[in-house]
Structures are given as C-alpha cells and as structure tokens.
Amino acid sequence: MIIANQLKKKNRAEFLLYLWQVEDIIRAYSCDFDRLNENYLSQFKLDGAIAQETRKWYADLCDMMRSEGVAGKGHLQICKNILMDLGELHARLLNSDKFPYYREMYYKVLPYIVELRGKGGHEQEPELQTCFDVLYGVMMLRLQKKEISEATAKAAADVSAMLGQLSDYYFKDKDTPIEF
C-alpha cells in the first residue's frame, strides 16, 4: 500500500504493474485475507496506523477481487480504468501532430506489439495491454531468476521507455490539460 501510494503519484505505468503484482499475491493466498495477513503482511513489521491502513487496503482488495469475479484471473476494475485512461491519452498523443517524439517511440515498439499479439492469439487486445503484459512478464521472469533473451530485454526497454513517457504525459495532463 505504501509503494502503491507513492507510485500512484509519480508513475501511472508502474502503479498499474504494481497493482497487477498485488493481485497475483492475493491470488497466491486464494483471496483469503487472514492467510495473507498471517503469512505475507506480517513479514513487513509495520506499526500502528500504517499497519492498520495496510491491512485494510489488502482486505478491501481481497473483497473487491471476489466481488468482481477476478479471484482466479483477470484484473480489478480499478486496473481496467487505469489502462483505459492511459489508452485514451495514448490515442490522443498519437493523433496529434504536437507529439512527434511520442509517436516515434510508439512506432519503435509497434513491431513488438504486432509480433506478441500474433504469437499469443490476442490480436483484438488493446495495444497498451500488450505493452503492459510484456513488462509484467519480464518482471515475473526476473523475480523467478529466469534468463531473459537479449531481444526480449530490448523490447521491454523500448516498451518501458514509451510507457514512462506516457505516464509523464498523464501527470502533465492532470496538472494542466494538454492541448492536443
């Protein structure tokens, strides 16, 4: 929760990836808050109000995952909304002549998107979903200490750069609406 609050304010893309990771952690405990609290949250040694707030945050997420039917797979509506907001901004940036650098970054990652959507049979999946899937997949490989090919690492770096730029534009647009 502490990390989520920090990321929510500084990097929308990393915030979404973090939420996906939290969803998977909750799934590892079968959306059972008591097990999650006893076996996962207890290791963080949080005190007082922060511990209480963190437990409530995870308990609420467990409840949301069950009520939204994503306890086994899928993503919370909040995650879908973040992806949708970023997708709308992504489309506006691409459709504007005022952001050639962003468009250039997009065209650099487009071949990766096309290739991955074709391989995975996800041709109808939104492009940004594919981009986030790439980064999440690489993050999981790293956590498992598995080898990442040079091509995959390059694709992930390019996708990460584009999503980082998109996140920067997201906060600029929230602060002072961007004129497209």
Image (cartoon, rainbow, N blue to C red):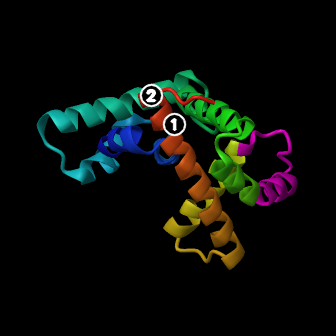
Q: Position of residue 119 (x, y in %)?
A: 85, 58
Q: Quadrant of residue 156?
A: bottom right
Instruction: Please tell me which residue lies in front, 72 or 86.
Output: 86
Instruction: Please tell me which residue lies in front, 38 or 133.
Output: 133
Instruction: Please identify the quadrant where the N terminus is shown.
Output: top left
Q: Quadrant of residue 134?
A: bottom right
Q: Position of residue 38 (x, y in %)?
A: 30, 45
For the residues labelled 1 and 2, the Cα–Cα distance comes to 10 Å
Residue that appears at 81% across and 59% down? 111
Q: Position of residue 23 (x, y in %)?
A: 50, 41
Residue that appears at 58% across and 23% down? 68
Q: Counting other residues with Cα less than 10 Å from the Cα at mark 2, is it few (<14), some (14-19), or many (20 or more)?
A: few
**Residue range of the region highlighted in magenta in the rendering:** 110-127
In the picture, measured across the screen, residue 80 lies left or right of residue 145, that is right
Q: Quadrant of residue 84?
A: top right
Our reading of the magenta stretch's main secondary structure is helix
Query: In the current view of this chain or complex, which residue is farthest to the left?
Result: 48
In the picture, measured across the screen, residue 159 lies left or right of residue 142, that is right
Mark drawn on residue 78: none
Q: Position of residue 114 (x, y in %)?
A: 83, 54
In the picture, measured across the screen, residue 117 lies left or right of residue 81, that is right
- For badge 2, the amino acid type reads Thr
Residue that appears at 63% across and 30% down? 180
Mark drawn on residue 176: 2
Q: Secondary structure at mark 1?
A: helix
Q: Is residue 122 magenta?
A: yes
Query: In the current view of this chain or complex, which residue is farthest to the top?
Result: 67
Instruction: Please tell me which residue lies in front, 135 or 45.
Output: 135
- For badge 1, the amino acid type reads Tyr
Residue that appears at 46% across and 29% down? 174
Q: Counting other residues with Cα less than 10 Å from the Cα at mark 1, is it few (<14), some (14-19), or many (20 or more)?
A: many
Mark drawn on residue 170: 1
